[in-house]
């Protein structure tokens, strides 16, 4: 018994070491999104370009939708902007913007100055839709599939690496699912 | 062996003390910064306790009341509006959890994921109690061995006497 007791500190040390070592590679800011695998919440907000045009979740048409939360106040939105332009041009996904807690005039100017990657941007001045989506800050990007289900929430900017590693595998998967759905319906 | 363990125990107690201290200070510092007006005292109290209980999703070590971040201000406004709509506290908490996940609760709900969190300390305390009782029980077994029985006492006396006589001889 006494000999066993001698090993307790070593065992505790190893257990603590493993736990702490694992903690090193975790991102404490990464939070699991509560909305993944849920339907896109419904909303009714004006468009950024035209304040008389009222948008709802039904306007987010497209097989695979990328909803990008952005603002002119957000530094990393400028960083991911060229990547978003490329993604929009690739036509594999439909890119929509959610202009989050911004000033309409500034946001419009931003889009004319830097080119507009979005089919349209929703103007969410008070961050109401942001709260519905569990947005904490910009940039954040949601992937919505052909059934209107949110499949992923990415916090932080998109760049080449993130797109390759995080988005493309999911997009391929959704495309496969869609093909399977269609063949089921066809047969 | 037992000395080692008392050291261990002291360290443990110290750790618990420090934890208790930090917990005390973090709740004491909370204060609201908005100028919302309430119809009655009860709603005001409910608002204050809600913004203390809910964690800011962006600045993870602050509650909604503490944080200056824009998202915390938005969520405070949301809590205020939901209160004015006559929502119950539990509905408001559910609203937040549905959007931001269990993470926003400073007092997480008891679930499969949080069993360790809720009952871990009790488990550790039990281990501590077991260790302490183990040590305390072991001691009395050792003590009788330290006392000499009659035969040993006589032998000791004989040795001492013998020693004395040799010493005396040397003096001479």
Image (cartoon, rainbow, N blue to C red):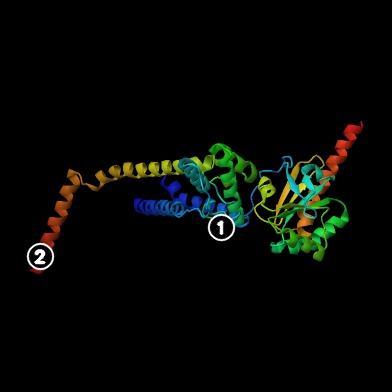
Query: In percent of the image, x 68 and y 49: which residue is there?
Result: A130
Q: Earlier in the sequence, mark 2 or mark 1?
A: 1
- Looking at the image, residue A42 sits to the left or right of residue B158; the answer is right
Query: In percent of the image, x 40 and y 44: which residue is there?
Result: B128
Residue B88: % across, % down: 55, 36
Label 1 sits on residue: B68
Label 2 sits on residue: B169
Residue A32: % across, % down: 65, 47
User: In this rendering, does residue B111 appear at all?
Assistant: no
> Vertical placement of A37 versus A185: above or below?
below
Task: Name the quadrant containing residue B122.
Answer: top left
Q: Chain of mark 1?
A: B
Mark 1 Cα shell of 10 Å, populated few (<14), some (14-19), many (≥20) = some
User: In this rendering, does residue A135 appear at all?
Assistant: yes
- In the image, A160 versus A120, the foreground residue is A120
Distance between mark 2 and mark 1 Cα atoms: 91 Å
| Labels 2 and 1 share a subunit | yes
Residue A114: % across, % down: 81, 65
Quadrant where the N terminus of chain A is found in the figure: top left
> Vertical placement of B110 versus B160: above or below?
above
- In the image, A148 versus B34, the foreground residue is B34
Q: Closer to us: mark 2 or mark 1? A: 1
Residue A102: % across, % down: 70, 58
In contact (CB < 8 Å): disc 2 and disc 1: no
> Vertical placement of B34 versus A59: above or below?
below
What is the count of numbered marks?
2
> Vertical placement of A76 versus B118: above or below?
below
Label 1: which secondary element: loop
Q: Chain of mark 2?
A: B
């Amino acid at each position: 018994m006494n000999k066993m007791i001698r090993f307790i500190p070593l065992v505790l040390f190893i257990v603590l070491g493993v736990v702490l070592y694992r903690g090193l590679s975790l991102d404490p800011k990464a939070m699991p999104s509560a909305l993944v695998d849920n339907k896109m919440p419904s909303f009714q907000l004006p468009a950024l370009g035209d304040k008389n045009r009222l948008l709802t979740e039904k306007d987010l048409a497209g097989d695979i939708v990328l909803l990008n939360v952005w603002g002119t106040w957000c530094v990393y939105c400028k960083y991911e902007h060229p990547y978003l332009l490329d993604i929009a041009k690739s036509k594999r996904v439909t890119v929509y913007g959610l202009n989050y807690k911004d000033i309409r005039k500034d946001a419009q100017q931003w889009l004319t100055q830097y080119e507009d990657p979005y089919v349209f941007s929703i103007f969410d001045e008070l961050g109401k839709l942001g709260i519905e989506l569990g947005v904490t800050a910009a940039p954040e990007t949601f992937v919505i599939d052909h059934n209107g289900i949110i499949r992923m929430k990415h916090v932080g900017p998109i760049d080449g690496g993130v797109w390759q590693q995080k988005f493309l595998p999911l997009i391929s998967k959704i495309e496969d699912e869609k093909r399977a759905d269609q063949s089921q319906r066809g047969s | 062996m037992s000395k080692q363990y008392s050291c261990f125990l002291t360290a443990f107690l110290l750790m618990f003390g420090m934890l208790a201290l930090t917990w005390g200070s973090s709740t004491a510092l909370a204060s609201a910064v908005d100028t919302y007006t309430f119809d009655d005292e009860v709603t005001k109290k409910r608002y204050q306790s809600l913004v203390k209980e809910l964690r800011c999703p962006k600045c993870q070590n602050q509650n909604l009341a503490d944080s200056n971040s824009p998202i915390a201000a938005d969520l405070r406004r949301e809590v205020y509006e939901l209160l004015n709509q006559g929502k119950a506290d539990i509905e408001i908490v559910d609203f937040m959890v549905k959007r931001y996940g269990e993470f926003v609760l400073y007092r997480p709900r008891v679930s499969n994921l949080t069993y360790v969190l809720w009952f871990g300390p009790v488990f550790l305390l039990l281990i501590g109690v077991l260790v302490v009782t183990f040590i305390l029980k072991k001691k009395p077994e050792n003590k009788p061995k330290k006392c000499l029985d009659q035969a040993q006492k006589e032998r000791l006396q004989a040795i001492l006497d013998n020693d004395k006589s040799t010493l005396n001889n040397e003096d001479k």
